[in-house]
Image (tube, grey):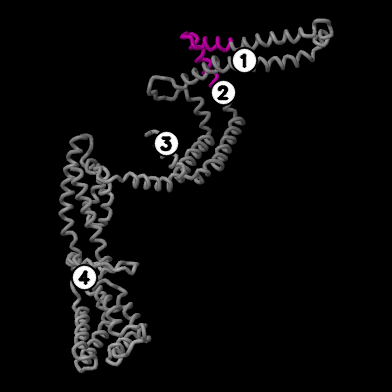
Amino acid sequence: MDGITATLAAANLGLVFFDLSYLPLRDFFLSGDLPLVEWKVPAPRFMLAYDPMKGITRNDDTQRYLDEFDKLRLQIRDTGLKSPEAAQQVQVLQTLSLQLLAEDPFLLADRVGTLETIKNQVRGRLQESSSEEAMRRFWTVEYLATVPDPGDQTPLAWFEDSVRPRIEKSNYVRSIDQDGIFVDSFWKIDIWFQIFFATELLARTFLIKRRYTSLSWREALLWRWYDLFLLVPVFRWLRVIPVGIRLQSSGLVNMETIRSQFSRGFVATFAGELVEVIALQVINQIQSSVQRGEITTWLTTSAQREYIDLNNTNEVEVISRRLAELMVYQVLPRLQPDIAAFLHRNAELAIEKTPIYQAMVRLPGMATLPRQLTQQLVGQVSQMLTQVSQGTYNALTLDDPALGQITDQLSRHFRNAFAEALQSQETLTELQSLITDLLEEVKVNYVNRLSEEDFDELLEEVEQLKQQQAS
């Protein structure tokens, strides 16, 4: 079903684009001339059957002009150019030409500029500054009988090739309704598609409302808001949005590449400014909080603030315990040799400066005793530090209510003492000033650089990560 509706929507969109392009392409349908190139193909004149839908009818004035020109060609073929009958026909064409210049019947076809082009062609051909004088001189037996220069056309052949096609392309008028608007009957075709898509939209709205009872009828209707473009009689080209979505969802057309490129272009255009604005807003809010002295308030009232726990787990406590465990059982044992070497060297330097050491090194067999004692002492001290740290951690992690109460009391007293120390006006002012300056430097040195980032490269990295995850 989705494939059928998507196909109908695509057909409707094709008709819309044909209707919108009909007038600009009518010259091609009439003559087969391709725009911007000098190629000519067989004219698809059958397309002109669409003329009534655009209110196009033949222009009697320009058609009479072309018919009189054809009569002149036939008269010249039968009796010659200098016959009285041909001269009379030339006089008729001269009168009609001057009338054409005065009335500009091409305006009825909404072809502004056609008459000016013809005027320029005739003036250029006869080297005249006045288009009326040039047209009057052109339609005389004397001028039509002139022998052209080598490589040039006769006047009648030139008119046939250069002027007549322009008149033929504008040889129509467009009907105007009572509101002064050109007649356009495309709605007579489009209404059947609109009825179908309106019925489908109502059915989908009913099914969505039935499936999601919490939605209102308005929300259910707007669930597929893009389908509303199929019902709007204006800006019909916007139907490309629902048609593209329908073709993609039905699987008839894979538009993922187009969607990806559109998304990348959109993100690359707005992401830099968006990230910069968000970062600046966050930093400015932090600066305002610091300047208002809210840090001290936060420290002194953090214990009383209500905190929403989602999983009955104190994540900060668990993280702290895990980091302490890593420090005590893995980091300190590996650093014990380095700690011992550090303490040993400092102890040696301290002992070497004492009078006892200087006296002992002079005694026979006692020169290495201080070094040995120092090495033993330092080894025991470094080992004791590790063991004490592990013992302290084990004691803190015991499930002992009394110890837990003492730990909580210690933490609370530490926080309160720290907050009271911060409440010193001198300290608080200095910290506020330093933090504000630091945030300002962050804005200058880092946030402003966000706009200089190449977001195309970042998006390329995102695509590579997606491909790696898919593989």
Q: Picture coordinates of residue 426 (x, y %)?
A: 62, 31
- Front one among 329 and 395: 329
Q: CA distance from mark 1 to mark 4?
A: 98 Å
Residue range highlighted in magenta:
387-415
Name the secondary structure under disc 2. Answer: helix
Task: Answer few, some or many: residues within 10 Å of disc 3's Cα (few below 14, many 20 plus, some between 14 and 19).
Answer: few
- The disc, 1 or 4, on the residue closer to the chain's N-terminal end is 4
Determine whether label 1 and label 3 are within 8 Å by CB: no
Q: CA distance from mark 1 to mark 2?
A: 32 Å
Residue in the image at 19% along x and 47% along y:
5
- The disc, 2 or 4, on the residue closer to the chain's N-terminal end is 4
Name the secondary structure under disc 4. Answer: strand
Image mark for residue 336: 1
- The disc, 1 or 3, on the residue closer to the chain's N-terminal end is 1
The image quarter containing residue 370 is top right
Residue that mark 4 sits on: 174
- The disc, 3 or 2, on the residue closer to the chain's N-terminal end is 2
Q: CA distance from mark 2 to mark 4?
A: 87 Å
From the viewer's perspective, is residue 146 above or below residue 196?
below
Residue that mark 2 sits on: 418
Label 1 vs label 2, nearer the camera = 1
Q: Picture coordinates of residue 417 (x, y %)?
A: 56, 21
